[in-house]
């Protein structure tokens, strides 16, 4: 009989292309991963990976096994959670891929409210790029994702659940911190810190600037960072000004380390969506969570963090 844990490790190796990297994500040693994969290959009578030093290349047989392994693991999870739910108690785990900084701040509080009804459900948040999250949704690797952009995929269903505001922040000692209002042309002379090109906040910013005939090439870009929290810290240190999600800047704003400055005539907002693969069968816990989001029963002004029921992995 196939070992489900071995299949889980197999999928990790297939995704990361390395025994050691897969082991790092699963908290296993590289020799242990290698030994388990050798045992799986013997059991199946087929080579799954070609060893190339520290890296591995998946074989044709391994490629064929990937979707079947995912299906088996998903089915096993549904069986387990269905049996546990027979007594009308919703239990299990929900994994949500998150490609936005605002999503990271929204999900803990939203899930805390969800757990008031379903206290035995655990949430895992996987923070990664939008492309990675969409890919994992399409192949059925995760049931839900959070994104600030709708990608055209026939399998995907979007539910908007929050309108995020992108604001300009400056260091507390910056001259603009006194006046709290500038014009779009004023941005051209200031060192500015940006997110990477495909980040949602940067796309919203560029759309806003375009309405005022300002292109990214006209900005005095001092730094590009791939993390909203790192950008907020860089602004605190006086390395430049930046546009970030209000949620990501909330801590610095409360402490007075950064100041929000209005850009006249350039309000920046974006929709945040919860996404699912409509073709993927959901467990009962996942079904209840989707219904909860669609029912609009939660109030984001009252959300509280319940980190005891959450695990957040990766970087935005």
Image (spheres, grey):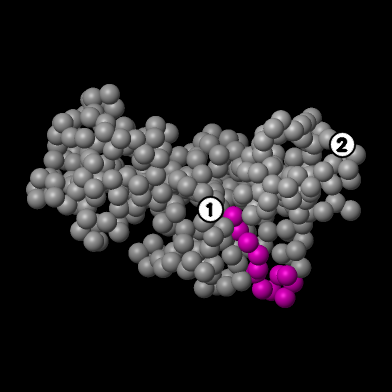
Q: Marks 2/1: CA distance?
A: 33 Å
User: Is 130 left, or right, of 237 in this rendering?
Assistant: right
Which mark is drawn over residue 313? 1
Instruction: Identify the residue position indicated by label 2 in the image.
Output: 46
Residue shown at the point (27%, 24%) measured from the top left: 217
Q: Position of residue 117 (x, y in %)?
A: 55, 72
Circles 2 and 1: CB atoms closer than 8 Å:
no
Residue shown at the point (65%, 65%) measured from the top left: 92
Query: Would you call the spot at circle 1 few (<14 residues within 10 Å), some (14-19), or many (20 or more)?
Result: some
Q: Position of residue 166 (x, y in %)?
A: 30, 45
Q: Answer above or below: position of 41 versus 288.
A: above
Q: Secondary structure at mark 1?
A: strand
Q: Nearer the viewer, residue 117 or 260?
A: 260
User: Is 304 left, or right, of 15 in this rendering?
Assistant: left
Residue shown at the point (73%, 47%) measured from the top left: 31
Rendering quarter of residue 270: top left
Q: Quadrant of the C terminus?
A: top left
Q: Secondary structure at mark 2?
A: loop
Q: Position of residue 79 (x, y in %)?
A: 77, 61
Q: Position of residue 227 (x, y in %)?
A: 39, 44
Rendering quarter of residue 95: bottom right
Query: Would you call the spot at circle 2 few (<14 residues within 10 Å), some (14-19), or many (20 or more)?
Result: some
Give the extent of the magenta segment: 84-95
């Amino acid at each position: 009989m196939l070992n489900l844990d071995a299949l889980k490790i197999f999928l990790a190796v297939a995704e990361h292309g390395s025994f050691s990297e897969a082991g790092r994500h699963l908290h296993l040693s590289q020799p242990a991963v290698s030994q388990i994969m050798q045992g799986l290959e013997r059991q199946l009578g087929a080579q799954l990976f070609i060893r190339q030093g520290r890296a591995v290349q998946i074989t044709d047989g391994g490629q064929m096994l990937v979707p079947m392994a995912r299906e088996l693991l998903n089915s096993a999870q549904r069986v387990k959670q269905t049996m546990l739910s027979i007594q009308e108690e919703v239990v299990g785990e929900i994994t949500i891929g998150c490609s936005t900084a605002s999503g990271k701040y929204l999900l803990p509080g939203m899930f805390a409210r969800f757990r008031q009804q379903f206290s035995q459900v655990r949430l895992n948040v996987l923070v990664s790029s939008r492309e990675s999250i969409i890919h994992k949704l399409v192949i059925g690797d995760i049931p839900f994702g959070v994104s600030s952009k709708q990608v055209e995929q026939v399998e995907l269903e979007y539910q908007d659940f929050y309108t995020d505001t992108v604001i300009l922040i400056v260091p507390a000692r910056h001259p603009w911190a006194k006046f709290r209002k500038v014009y779009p042309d004023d941005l051209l002379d200031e060192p500015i810190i940006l997110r990477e090109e495909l980040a949602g906040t940067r796309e919203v910013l560029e759309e806003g600037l375009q309405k005022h005939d300002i292109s990214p090439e006209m900005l005095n870009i001092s730094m590009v960072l791939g993390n909203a929290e790192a950008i907020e810290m860089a602004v605190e240190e006086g390395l430049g000004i930046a546009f970030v999600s209000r949620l990501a800047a909330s801590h610095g704003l409360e402490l007075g380390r950064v100041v929000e400055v209005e850009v006249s005539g350039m309000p920046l907002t974006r929709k945040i969506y919860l996404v699912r693969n409509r073709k993927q069968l959901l467990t009962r816990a996942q079904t209840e969570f989707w219904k909860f989001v669609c029912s609009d029963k939660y109030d984001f002004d009252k959300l509280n963090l319940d980190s005891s029921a959450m695990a957040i992995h990766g970087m935005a």
